Image (cartoon, rainbow, N blue to C red):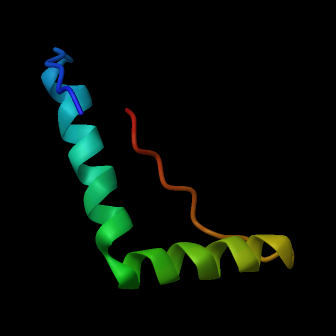
Amino acid sequence: MKQEMVQIPKNEYEELLEEVGILRNAEMMEAIKQSDEAKKKGVKTWDIKTHL
């Protein structure tokens, strides 16, 4: 497989690193799953704003 170098803004790179960290964290993924299930049942959940 050929590798290719691309350039992206530093803040976008940092956001991607954070997302990967969340996806690899089993506890965080379980919390997200529970939140999604609660929303389906009509429970008011926290709104997390990632971009200011």
Q: In which quarter of the image is the C terminus?
A: top left
Q: Report which quarter residue 16 is drawn in.
A: top left
Q: Report which quarter residue 42 is drawn in.
A: bottom right
Residue 13 point in image, percent of width and height: 20, 32
**Residue at (19% x, 28% y) in the render:** 11
**Residue at (18% x, 39% y) in the render:** 14
In the picture, measured across the screen, residue 42 lies left or right of residue 33, that is right
The residue lying toward the viewer, choosing from 1 and 26, is 1
Report the number of discs. Answer: 0
**Residue at (40% x, 44% y) in the render:** 50
Query: In the rendered view, would you say 31 is above or below 46?
Result: below
In the picture, measured across the screen, residue 16 lies left or right of residue 37, that is left
In the picture, measured across the screen, residue 14 lies left or right of residue 48, that is left
**Residue at (20% x, 26% y) in the render:** 2
Q: Quadrant of the N terminus?
A: top left
Residue 17 point in image, percent of width and height: 21, 47
Tell which residue pokes out farthest to the front in this image.
1
The residue lying toward the viewer, choosing from 7 and 44, is 7
